Image (spheres, helix red, strand yellow):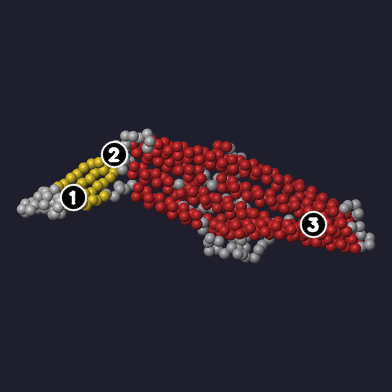
Amino acid sequence: MCAYSYIYYVVRAVLLGVMGVLLSTTSVLSGSNLTLTDAVHLAQTNDPWLEGNVHMQQALEADSIGAAQLPDPTVSVGWINVPTDTFDNDQEPMTQLKVGINQVFPRGDTRQLKQKQIQQTSARYPYMRADRRAKVALTVSQQWLDAYRYGESIRLIEQDRKLFEQLVEVALSSYSSVSGSTSNQDVVRAQLELTRLEDRLLQLRMQQDIVREQLGEWLEWGDYSTEHSLAIDQLPSITLPAVLATQADVATVSHHLRSHPLIVGMDQKITASETTVALRQQLYKPQWGINASYGFRQDDQLGEDRADFFSIGVQFDLPLFTDKRQDQRVRSATSMAEAVKTEKMLALRALQAQFEASYAQLQQLNQRKALYKDRLLKEIDDQAEAALGAYTHDRGDFSEVVRARIVALNARIDQLNIEVDRLKVMAQINYLFASSEVESLAAAGAHHPEFHHE
């Protein structure tokens, strides 16, 4: 067997073995048992933000009870009309010990409206929690997918590194052989590409460590140890909402986006702001108060009984000059209510734009996935084997063999990136459609993933 044939069969065997490993999609890590669904549930269950939000809602509910009550009455006690020459209680008939009480009644329906406004504000908080749970699911899922991307890229490069090591050995063997056609430049080129792979591995490991630390921020709030328990080497399965199983029309998508917890929460905010306008309008009504007092008098100097005094009265203010106070405060509340409506409109437009961009991106990624699967990878592998065959028969260049293998490696990493990007876009769309059970979530405050997994 000639030297060229020997090189061809050795390298071809290495290529076939490497390609078989590259086409494998799973590798099991010992002790890996925490799936993406588990991670999402764990992050949602132990999210301190949700607990703080519940406390804020409870605080508002407690405030609403107090807001409906009358102000505390005020009590006054006084010693009045005391003669300053003797300070004798029975010297003058008007000297008395006076005890009074005063009760103020807020303007119009102020108490009821204030209670209603606080209750409407607190009703927004369950929807805020539903939106937070959906965002946590999105964040954890995307970080998980990034961790998988980096880990799988490392695996692909490490497998290809073995091939490049073999190519370096083949190049050295051919260069040192008398009959070999490999030049020193070919040896240097093969070693250079091997060094570049080492650099890519270092960068990917750094990015993998960063994203695992970011993921740990969500998972380490609970009692679950994540040191050796993340099944990040397994590609999770994510599905789109059922409404998108077929081509969804604009009206259907708009309806679901309007039911998003973020938007429903803003509806509650708008309702509360409209109640604030009604509350400010009570400023045009007078504030009433009632007061009563009892004056106790001593007997006179001759021992004659003196009648005690009882007084009662009503007080109220007159909001006559309203242009600088009441009018301005009502105008302020009205403008704030309109601003909240604008805020909702902008948020809804943002969700719509995010969906359109994500859905269009998903369609393009699906096309690229099919292209890689049906044609591109096969053509690239054929090119790599053809380059190797040409080189072993002295009809090709060694640098072309190396370049073809780099193209093949990059293509498989691109295929991986396409699949990961598809799932990340699907996770984003699932967040936008986190609405089907928003009412029950708001009522129960349950920890629900708001995320669709197979």
Position of residue 206 measured from the top left corner of the image (x, y, whole percent): 67, 59
- Where is mark 2, residue-wise? 317
Pointer 3 residue: 193
Give the residue drawn at x 62%, y 55%. 144
Q: Amino acid at mark 1?
A: Ile
Mark pair 2, 1: CA separation:
27 Å
Which residue is at the front of the view, 20 or 45? Answer: 45
Q: Residue sitting at 56 percent across and 45 percent down?
A: 432
Category of crowding for the residue at label 3, using alpha-carbon neighbours closer than 10 angstroms: few (below 14), some (14–19), many (at least 20): some
* Observer able to see residue 14: no
Q: Residue furthest front?
A: 85
Provide residue 281's location: percent of width, then percent of height: 36, 37
Q: Residues within 10 Å of mark 2 (few under 14, many from 20)?
A: few
Disc 3, SS: helix
Q: Position of residue 185 (x, y in %)?
A: 87, 57
Q: Please tell me how crowded label 1 is: few (under 14), some (14-19), or many (20+) other residues with Cα within 10 Å.
A: few
- Answer with left or right where residue 191 lies relative to residue 101: right
The residue that mark 1 highlights is 80
Marks 2 and 1: which is nearer the front?
Answer: 1
Task: Report if the CB atoms under discs 3 and 2 are less than 8 Å apart.
Answer: no
At 82% from the left and 50% from the top, the residue drawn is 383
Q: Name which quarter of the figure residue 203 lies in.
A: bottom right
